[in-house]
Amino acid sequence: DASPLLAVGDLRAALGGPEARIVSIFGSIDLHHPSSEALCASIGRRLAEAVPDATVVTGANAAVHDLIARSFVRSVEEDRREEEAGGGVGVGEGEREDDEDDKMKMRTEKKARVFHLAPVGYRCDWTH
């Protein structure tokens, strides 16, 4: 039987339904440019700032998956800790106060969500 173990619709439902904000990361197994690591870390940080309630889904086997997901998780958790400590996050240029309140609510109510999808039998050793 060539059917998938989990259909895309089932995955979307498990991750929050049609309203879920899901970001899928695809990339190279190896890094090929000296600035790739810094670029991936920057993408993860920016994703956490822009869409802290996103669910990140990776293919569980590439350097790009690991670096972006790790940076995303670290950034969401740092923002949450800063908010809990009373540091808060300022409103950026062009943002409304309501938008920032919504972002902070999402950051403090839930942890970063990352899922590494892998073939049956493959073991992903990442802890984020």
Image (tube, rainbow, N blue to C red):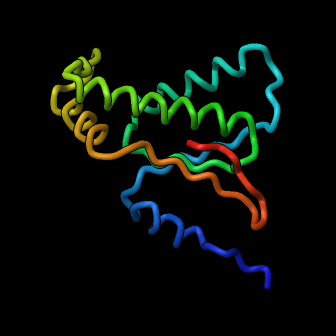
What residue is rendered at 27% in x and 39% in y?
108
Q: Is residue 125 above or below residue 68?
A: below
What residue is rendered at 80% in x and 38% in y?
29
Q: Where on the picture, by quarter, is residue 66? A: top right
Q: Where on the picture, by quarter, is residue 18? A: bottom left
Total numbered labels placed on residues in the image: 0
Q: Nearer the viewer, residue 59 or 86?
A: 86
Residue 52, image x, y percentages = 38, 37
Q: Nearer the viewer, residue 68 or 23?
A: 68
Q: Is residue 87 above or below residue 43?
A: above
Q: Is residue 70 above or below residue 25?
A: above
Q: Nearer the viewer, residue 126 or 29?
A: 126
Residue 96, image x, y percentages = 19, 26
What residue is rendered at 26% in x and 21% in y?
89
Q: Quadrant of the C terminus?
A: top right
What residue is rendered at 24% in x and 17% in y?
90
Question: Going by the image, does 45 lie left or right of 52?
Answer: right
Q: Nearer the viewer, residue 26 or 121?
A: 121
Q: Where on the picture, by quarter, is residue 13? A: bottom left
Question: Going by the image, does 18 lie left or right of 22?
Answer: left
* Furthest residue toward bottom: 1
Residue 1, image x, y percentages = 79, 85
Residue 20, image x, y percentages = 40, 56
